[in-house]
Amino acid sequence: MKLYNTSAGIILQHNNENYLLNIDWNELINHDNLFQFLSTQTKNKVDINLNNIKILAPINKQEVWAAGVTYLRSRDARMEESKDAGGADFYSKVYNAERPELFFKALPHRVAAHNEEVFIRQDSKWNVPEPELTLFINSKGKIAAYTIGNDMSSRDIEGENPLYLPQAKVYERSAALGPCLYVCENEISLDTTISINIKRENSKVFEGSIQLNRMKRKFDELAEYLFRENVFEHGCFLMTGTGIVPPNDFTLNINDEVEITIANIGTLKNFIACRK
């Protein structure tokens, strides 16, 4: 089942049919057993084309956090970009450590939706998108749903000094979520593929894909560490890291189009811009 937060209200999509739900978003997604609850909500069927309405980010009062260095490819990229600053060992050690890297990413008002702009920093020369499966973890610490995340990153800033990570990661529209929440009865399959396609002036300039089974960390492990000393009254989103990293000579340009696709969830599309 898929939950869409839209300009027309909350739309539940089940078996190719759409249903309008009259309930508060935060209350809905924090339901004790979201899958079972949604199974009882297929009553108010609506004839609506999601392509004709604005799809909002599937977030309201939730924070967005992120995990780093959860794939071997990410570890290698971080080590390469930071070797001149002497920071390569940090990424090697955290990849193998018991404790994962977790960091704050965004407040709701800084999160872009499907078909909206994400920003690159104007004081950075090396910017990339990071396609990531994103967990929705409810207020009780249970993984309740999944979505697609774009964790925008300024690689040159983080590479200059690992202490610059917040500046490389946390700024206006540095995150995108969507297009929906995917709610399934069991954990998402680790054979699921994440793919990314970047276009520039209608020509493909980068593409890549990876399966979730290449991730070193387990989803429950990441969620447990995040909730150890944090309380999330309305739940939270956790980006789980990327295993797709463009080559070192690649950087995003204004007006590039970024499409991230995860099987069973859909495609999150964003356009590259900068803050005016």
Image: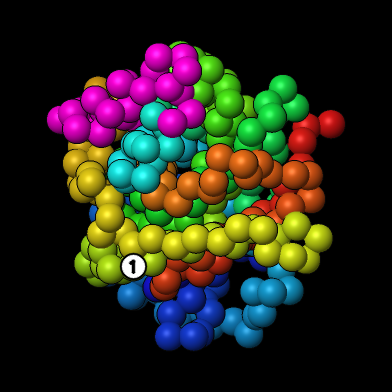
Most foreground residue, 233 or 79 = 79
Q: Position of residue 259 (x, y in %)?
A: 60, 61
Quadrant for the N terminus in the image:
bottom left
Q: Give the residue at the far left of this rendering.
A: 98
Name which residue lies at 55% across and 31% down: 155
Q: How many labels were placed on the picture? A: 1
The reply to whether residue 25 is in sight is no
Residue lying at 79% horizontally and 50% vertically, measured from the top left: 255
Q: Which residues are magenta?
A: 80-102
The relative height of residue 266 versus residue 232 in the rendered view (above or below) is: below
Position of residue 142 in the picture relative to residue 75 (left or right):
left
Query: Secondary structure of the magenta portion, mostly?
Result: helix
What's the amino acid at mark 1? Answer: Thr
> Where is 65 relative to 3, above or below?
above
Residue pointed to by mark 1? 192
* Residue 93 among those drawn in magenta: yes
Residue at 35%, 36% in the rendered image:
75
- In the structure shown, which secondary structural element does the residue marked by tag 1 occupy? loop
Of residue 90 and residue 21, the one placed in the foreground of this image is: 90
The quadrant of the picture occupied by the C terminus is top right
Instruction: Using residue 223 as the reference point, say whether residue 57 is left or right of it.
Output: right
Q: Residues within 10 Å of mark 1 (few under 14, many from 20)?
A: some
- Left or right: where 110 falls relative to 217: right
Residue 165 picture location, percent across and down: 48, 22
The residue depicted at 43 percent of the width and 80 percent of the height is 14
Give residue 168's position: percent from left, percent from top: 56, 26
Image-quadrant location for residue 121: top right
The answer to whether residue 257 shows anywhere in this view is yes
